[in-house]
Image (tube, rainbow, N blue to C red):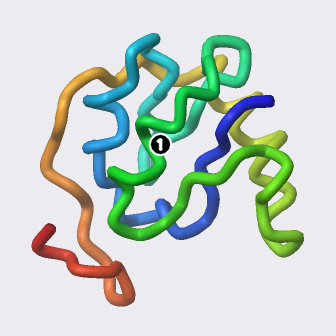
Amino acid sequence: MAYVVAEPCRHCKYTYCAAVCPVEAFREGSDCLYIDPSVCIDCNKCRPECPVEAIYPDYEVPSVWHGWIAENAVQSKHSPVILDVKVPLKKEGCINPEY
């Protein structure tokens, strides 16, 4: 099992989750984050840090976002590791955009 970043992260890209990851599993895409499933240790430290509730265990990803399981696996291989908190992107519809 691995955790997956899903659609709610798109255009928000909060990075608090990456800052608490003990194994550097998060990768930074241009408009969202990804989790490398080969690095993720399923510790669940990231999930409570996500203000837009975009992180799921792979077996709990809502069916509408199942494509994000493969998206994380593919994109994480081509995106750089992110370790620190960065200024989030802003978009209408983000939960608490001033988090």
Q: Is residue 99 left or right of residue 26?
A: left
Q: In this view, does 4 lie to the left or right of 59?
A: left
Quadrant hosting residue 91 = bottom left
| Residue topped by disc 1 | 33
From the viewer's perspective, is residue 72 above or below residue 79?
below
From the viewer's perspective, is residue 51 above or below residue 45?
below
Q: Where is residue 94 in the image (x, y as percent from the top left)?
A: 35, 79
From the viewer's perspective, is residue 23 above or below residue 33?
above
Counting other residues with Cα less than 10 Å from the Cα at mark 1, is it few (<14), some (14-19), or many (20 or more)?
many
- Type of amino acid under label 1: Leu
From the viewer's perspective, is residue 49 above or below residue 38?
below
Q: Which of 61 and 83 is in front in this view?
A: 61
Q: Position of residue 98 (x, y in %)?
A: 11, 73
Q: In this view, does 76 lie to the left or right of 71?
A: left
Q: Position of residue 34 (x, y in %)?
A: 56, 38
* Label 1 secondary element: strand
- Residue at image position (33%, 66%) is 51
- Residue at image position (39%, 24%) is 21
Q: Which of 53 and 90 is in front in this view?
A: 53
Q: In this view, does 55 lie to the left or right of 24?
A: right
- Residue at image position (75%, 52%) is 68
